Amino acid sequence: MSLNAIMNTANSGLTAAQTQLRVVSDNVSNVNTPGYVRKIAEQQTLVSMGVGSGVEVARIRLATDRFLQAASFNAGADAARQSVRYELYDRLQGLFGDPGGDNGFFQGVDKAFAAFAAAAEDPASSPRRQEALFRTQALFDEGNRIAGQIQAVREDADGRIQSAVDQANSLLQQIEALNIEIARSSAVGGDGSGAETAQAALIGQLSELMDVRVSTRSVGGVSIRTGAGVLLAGEGHATLEYNRAGTVNAETAFNEIWVTEPRGQKRPLLESITSGEIKGLVETRDIEAPQVAERLAELLTRVADELNRAHNANSSVPAPTSLTGRNVGQSLEAALTGFTGNTAVAVTNTSGQVQARADIVFGAGTITINGTATTPAGFLATLNAELGGAATASFSNGVLSLSATGTNGVVVADDPSNPSNKIGRGFSHFFGLNDLITSDRPAIYQTGLTTSSPHGFTPGETMTLRFTGETGAKIRDLSVAIPAGGTVGDLLTALNDPATGVGRFGSFVLDSTDGTLRFNALNTPAPRISVLEDRTTQVPSGVSITELFGIGGGVRASRGDGFSMRTDIRQSPSLLGLARFDFAAGVGATALTSGDGRGALGLADAGQVNAAFQSAGDSLGGQISASRYASELAGDIGGRAALTKTAMDSAVALHSEAAARQRAEEGVNLDEELVLMTTYQQAFNASARLIQAARDLYDILLGMV
């Protein structure tokens, strides 16, 4: 070997050792830097003409373990998803107060019924009446507040989705910029490890927003895809698009989150991710919070309905001068069809004596008033004639009203032995003539309609439905027009049409027992239905199809913030109906007695009467008392909060373990670096001594010449 070859070999060793020492120095100086990945300088032998000619550092790379990195990213995405779910669900639980305390919402349900029981013991006591009214109003006020706060949680989640999308776009831009820098360094043989370290940190942040898969490119840098394979970075960067909804209410239809791949293909993001903060926020906004809102609204609806059932069977003493019902969402003829049993409309003076009375008998397709036969179309005229001017009945915009003349009052009472009945409601209860709790929107979806009933909507009016899949991504928007046929059966046919209606997803079915409309899905899991727009208006009530039948969870949940106590009763507790009308009393006899508290017992027992709860959220409903439903809802919310906490703790622990193992493999070990430093110092010294030896040989040879 020539002296030149020896010098070249020594110089290569000296350069390689210097590079190795610089890498070790970088590792040691960053031992406590979060996210720093240890550098490794890969050294190889130089060969010339088949003969070794020294060493060189081929490249400097990061000590990245792709398996551990993928495990850490996946665990981080799940931890972020479960953490945000727990955070928001814990807020939802907190809205209801402590389930085991004395001042929570659910305790207020039993307190309201207990206050009526106390009023029954002394019905003439004004303080006890006021206490019962206060407790009842407080219950619905608290329900209104909670319903509003649930929507505030959803609005917060929606805003955070927008922030997460903006953050993801920024991260993808930075990751792709570093891809270019790393590829350039790789092409010229430079050190791109610094850019790779920065890129790994950015990918870690991205993985907390959505689950990602990372692969190394042959030219340097990485390709990033979602869990379902949508390209996010590697050939340019993808762009995410989302426009938040602004003010959120129960019926808000949220916009789609789109991802446009580098090649220009646009896809729904939610179809391609299964974890991450965005997924957790969408789940809370679109599934968990709406389920709580729907169940709360159903509870408040049944509490109100059972109180109204009891109050419609009662009367104040003296009786109120007028009774104004609720909007039943149909014509009077349709509303009267299907009634059975007997009821009476009576006019009483301030002493409770009957001044006039009209006894209504509903038979199989027949109606008589004081023995005079009539029809649903002639009902009002016949009733007014039989009342002889002592009171007047009217029907306008879906609302039945009764008004007595002068200082007299009006009472509606059922025959105890054969009470009037339609879909489990008496005449007064069905029309809401003496309701204690009112609502600013339709809240009862047991319409009593049949397929042969007139629907009352104008042909050509439209409603737009959105079907959403299990992931939260939109499946399809459908616009359905009111058909020319005027019956509810014709309306169902149009709704269920496979070409222009919902037939490809399932069918709407009208319950033959109570007129409730439900959707039967063809596939499992069933798609979620929301109403984007409803331009239908029923004549004469003015309600839409959505409001009449409660289509979609949004309109059902919106009931929760619309209940309140009747204004006149709230202002004058003496109007609270605690007395029971004596159905046997004829004209001239006393039918209402001051101090009668029998009706208060009905109000007190309203919480224990089995009510027909409809499906809401993830509850199938069924026959259950309001108090029992409240207890089960409290337990369900608490149980779910505990489950989300457990899921979060497990996911965070798994992420911590995965990150610890990754740090152990990729992080800096000072003992190892000390060994490497010693080794490369010795290699450096050896190369320097070899150079010195070659120099000495040069000097000797030159001296011999």
Image (cartoon, rainbow, N blue to C red):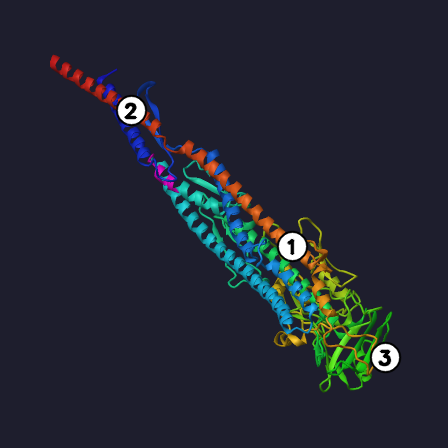
The answer to whether residue 385 is seen in the rendering is yes
**How far from the left and from the top, in percent, is residue 6?**
24, 19
Most foreground residue, 665 or 605: 605
Q: Amino acid at mark 1?
A: Ser
Amino acid on which disc 3 is placed? Asn
Which residue type does callout 2 highlight? Thr
Residue 254 pos. (x, y %): 56, 59
How far apart are the two marked residues, 1 and 2, measured between alpha carbons? 71 Å
Using the image, determine if residue 72 lies above or below residue 136: above
Q: Which residue is mark 1?
A: 631
Q: Residue 196 magenta-drawn?
A: yes
Indicate the position of residue 671 as horizontal and vertical percent values: 34, 27
Give the vertical position of 353 relative to 254 (above or below): below
The answer for how far apart the CA atoms under marks 3 and 2 are is 113 Å
From the viewer's perspective, tell me whether residue 632 is left or right of residue 213: right
Could one spot residue 530 in this view of the protein? no
Q: Position of residue 168 (x, y in %)?
A: 45, 50
- The quarter in which the N terminus is drawn is top left
Q: Quadrant of residue 149?
A: bottom right
**Which is more N-terminal, label 1 or label 3?**
3
Residue at image mark 3: 370
> Mark 2 highlights which residue?
678
Sort mark 1 into few (<14), some (14-19) or many (20+) by Cα contacts within 10 Å. Answer: some
